[in-house]
Image (cartoon, rainbow, N blue to C red):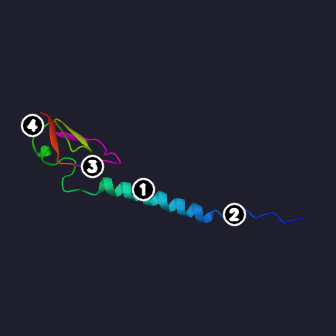
Amino acid sequence: MAEPIPAPDRSRDAALAGGIAALTLVVILVANLVPTGHAAAGRPAEDPACLEWTDDCVVCTRDGGSVACTTPGIACVRRAPECTRR
């Protein structure tokens, strides 16, 4: 009688998948947390008359003395901030 075929060792595959997942997470975090030359606010944030602005990744609104901004998407390309509501 023939000997049974041993099960393949999947530990290397699991380690590789875990490494890829960790690298993907790091890239996403770095892309969203590292400041760029024109962060989410830019010049419109310095203009008290501007109530809402965007850089095509983040939309920020001014309500009284506070500013609230959305979270950037994964695949966004920032551009110069522009005031969209006064």
x and y percent of residue 19 in the render?
49, 62
First reached walking from the N terminus: tag 1 or tag 4: 1
Q: Give the residue type at disc 2.
A: Pro
Choose top left, top right, bottom left or bottom right for residue 25: bottom left
Q: Give the residue type at disc 4.
A: Ala
First reached walking from the N terminus: tag 3 or tag 4: 4
Q: CA distance from mark 3 to mark 4?
A: 26 Å
Q: CA distance from mark 3 to mark 2?
A: 43 Å
Q: CA distance from mark 2 to mark 4?
A: 66 Å
Q: Give the residue type at disc 1.
A: Leu
**Tag 3 residue:** 77
Within-10-Å neighbours for mark 3: few <14, some 14–19, many 20+ = few
Identify the magenta region.
65-78
Which label was assigned to residue 36? none
The residue closer to the viewer here, 7 or 45, is: 7
Q: CA distance from mark 1 to mark 4?
A: 38 Å
**Tag 2 residue:** 8
**Tag 4 residue:** 49
Within-10-Å neighbours for mark 1: few <14, some 14–19, many 20+ = few
- Is there CB contact under 8 Å for labels 3 and 2? no
Choose top left, top right, bottom left or bottom right for residue 84: top left
As displayed, is residue 24 above or below residue 43? below
Q: Secondary structure at mark 2?
A: loop
Query: In this rendering, which labeled residue sits more in front, label 1 or label 2?
Result: 2
Q: Give the residue type at disc 3.
A: Val
Query: Which residue is depicted at the point 81% across and 63% down?
Result: 4
Query: Which residue is depicted at the point 19% across and 40% down?
Result: 66
**Tag 1 residue:** 25
First reached walking from the N terminus: tag 3 or tag 2: 2
